[in-house]
Amino acid sequence: MAQAPIQFDRASGALEGANLWERTAALALATGSKISSHFSHRGYIGCANLLRKTLPERNIAIRLNKDAVFEFPYGDGYWSKLLNRSYHYEDELELLFRHSADVDYTLIDCGANYGYWSVLVSSRPFGSHRAIAIEPSSQNFAKLSNNAEVNDCRFEVMKCAIGAARGTAHLTGTKHEAFSIAGANSGGEEVPVIALDDLIDDGKISADGKYLIKLDVEGVEVEAIKGGSRLLEGDSVILCEEHGNDPDHTVSRYILEKTPLKLIVYDPRSNRLETVTELSILDRIKVSTHVGYNVFGTQSAFWQSRINALNADVARRMQ
C-alpha cells in the first residue's frame, strides 16, 4: 500500500508527514533551488534526481493556494523547485492567468505534464476556469489524472498529442518534462494525435469561446499552430515555449512571418508584455540556453485589449 503523500504548504512553509531524512531532503531541495536560481537553475534537476534515489517512493502534495493541490513524486528534479517558496514557475504565464481571472475563458493545456496550470487556473483565486489538460504520455497521464482527482475532478483530461492533423505518432524521450513526438520516430510509445481544430469538430469546445492555449509540445509548436487555424481566428491566445537553445527563434519567427497573429513577449526590462516587430528583442531576452521562454500569439482584439490593461496595471503598481 502506497504511503500517504507528504504535505507542503507554500504559503506557510509547513511540511507535514515527512520523516527526518525527508525533511532534510526538503531543506536541501529548497536551498539548492535558491542557490541555482542565480544561474537559471542550471544543474538543479540532475542533482535533485540523484537525491531522489535516496528517498522512499512516495508523493508530495504541494498546496499552491487555498484551493489548489499539486502532487508529484517526492524528489522529482523538475517540480521540486516548488519547495523553494520564492520560486515562481513561468511567472509570465501566471501574470496573464491572474489578470484574466474575471474573464470567461477556457484553458487548453497542451503538453499538460502533471497538470500544474490546469490545477491553478481551475482554482478559485485564478477564477475557477474550465480547463482541458491534454497529455500523450501514459506515465505522465497517470499523474495528471491523479491531480485531477485530488482537485475534485474539476478539470478534464485527454490522453493524446497535439499536431497539425489527426493521426498517430511515437513519443520518445527520457525526461518526463521533455517527451516529444517531433521527428520520424519509430520507437517509443504510440500515441494518438489530434489538431486543435479537432476540439471544435469533436464538440469539446465551441469556435466562438474565449481560450488561452498553452502549447508546451516539445518541438511541434509550429505543427500545432497549423492545426489550430480556425480556433486562432477567434478570441484565443497561444502561449508557446521558445527554446533558449534556438538562436533562430523558430516558433516566434513562424508566428511573426507566417501567421496573422501578433507576437507578444514578456520583457523583464520593462516588466511588460511587449508586441514584437523585430526578433532581435529575443536575442536579449533569451539569456539561458537550457531553459524555455514563453511567447504569446493572438489576433483577438479582446485579448490585445486585456494585455494592454495588464501592462497599465503593472505600470501603476510600479509607480
Image: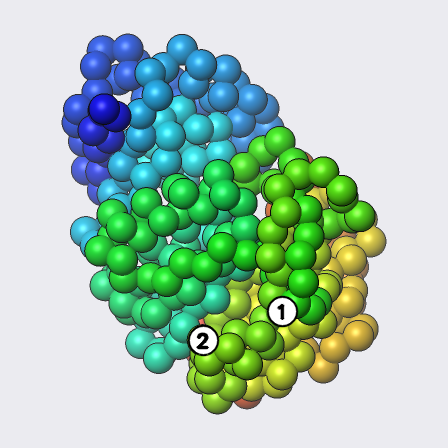
- How far apart are the alpha carbons under marks 2 and 1? 12 Å
Q: What amino acid does circle 1 point to?
A: Ala
Residue in the image at 62% along x and 60% along y? 193
- Which mark sits nearer the N-terminus, 2 or 1? 1
Q: For numbered disc 1, what is the local secondary structure? A: loop
Query: Residue 195's mark?
Result: 1
Q: Residue at x 47, y 66 (%)?
A: 108
In front: 48, or 183? 183
Residue drawn at the location 32% of the way across and 39% of the way down:
71
Q: Is residue 306 left or right of residue 232?
A: left
Q: Secondary structure at mark 2?
A: loop
- Percent from the top left, x then y, of residue 200? 52, 80
Image side of residue 209 versus residue 283, left or right: left
Q: Which quadrant of the structure image shows residue 133?
A: bottom left
Percent x, y for residue 15? Answer: 20, 28
Looking at the image, residue 180 sits to the left or right of residue 114; the answer is right
Residue pointed to by mark 2 = 204
Task: For residue 177, say whether it is visible.
Answer: yes
Position in image of residue 123 (x %, y %): 27, 60
Q: How many marks?
A: 2
| Residue at the (17%, 27%) spot, across then down | 16
Q: How was the colour assigned to the protein in this rendering? A: rainbow
Q: Taking 188 as reference, is 165 above or below it?
A: below
- How far from the left and from the top, in percent, is residue 319? 40, 65
Vertical arrangement, residue 175 with respect to residue 212, above or below: above
Q: Quadrant of the N terminus?
A: top left
Of 132 and 184, nearer the camera is 184
**Identity, as a three-letter code, of the amino acid under mark 2:** Lys
Which one is in front, 63 or 219?
219
In depth, the one of 161 and 274 nearer the eye is 161
